[in-house]
Image: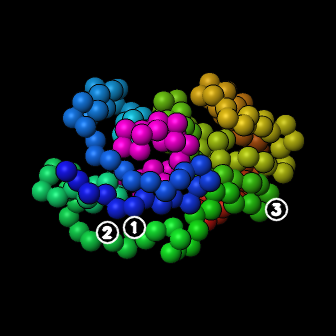
Amino acid sequence: MLNFPYTELPTNHYKPSFMRELKLGEAIQIARMPQLLEAHLTAFLGFILGDKTLALALTIQERYYLLMLYRTCQHNTDLALVGDYKHYFIQPSQRLIWTHQQQDDQLTLVQLTGQYAEILEELCEDVVDWTLGAMALQCQDIKDIEQWPTMPIAATRDQVAQVMRERIALLEALPDNTFDNLYAHYQHLDEQF
């Protein structure tokens, strides 16, 4: 039996709780899934948190924070981590706040969520696709693109994928210099997360 510490995340939709240990049957279900890492992580988090919807709504930072927290509780198993990871597991109330949105005079950027990561993993074939896809999903507002599609609130997987494709088409239509300037702003804001 694994003992997990109190889990606290800084999102509005997540209430502090305790993780539970993965059951053998759940591990088998995950192992039988197609080899999509983000989908595996969603299933894993859905089981240990008891809520798949939450696993999709968490940011990438939060998802990997929970995965590492789970793995640090493993001892004498194949999943055990060697090393001291205590400094990575400071409760959010004791550190700088994770921000979910960054903004400058050119654009507004949000963090990637589990749902966004799964869509990227499923639809993108190479690093260019991933870069444009991530930009399309994270950029919620771009000052110089008037027709930038709005992401619906509580969007379905298909709606998110459709908006991503529409936004990628707009990005691909930009002149190189304009795109380079936008990408510099995007990179700068993304590094703030």
Residue 124 visible? The answer is no
- Boundaries of the magenta span: 46-67
Is the C-beta separation of discs 3 and 2 under 8 Å?
no
Task: From the viewer's perspective, tell me whether residue 73 is left or right of residue 150.
Answer: left
Residue at 20% across, 64% down: 82
Residue 92 visible? The answer is yes
Q: Name the residue under label 3.
A: 105
Between disc 3 and disc 1, whose residue precedes? 1
Q: Mark 1 points at which residue?
A: 89
Is the C-beta separation of discs 1 and 2 under 8 Å?
yes
Give the amino acid at mark 2. Tyr
Crowd class of label 3 (few under 14; some 14 to 19; many from 20; radius 10 Å): few
Residue 115: give x, y in percent of width and height.
54, 37
Q: Residue 42 carries which label?
A: none
**Residue 193 appears in which quarter of the rendering?**
bottom right
Give the amino acid at mark 1. Phe
Residue 153: give x, y in percent of width and height.
72, 37
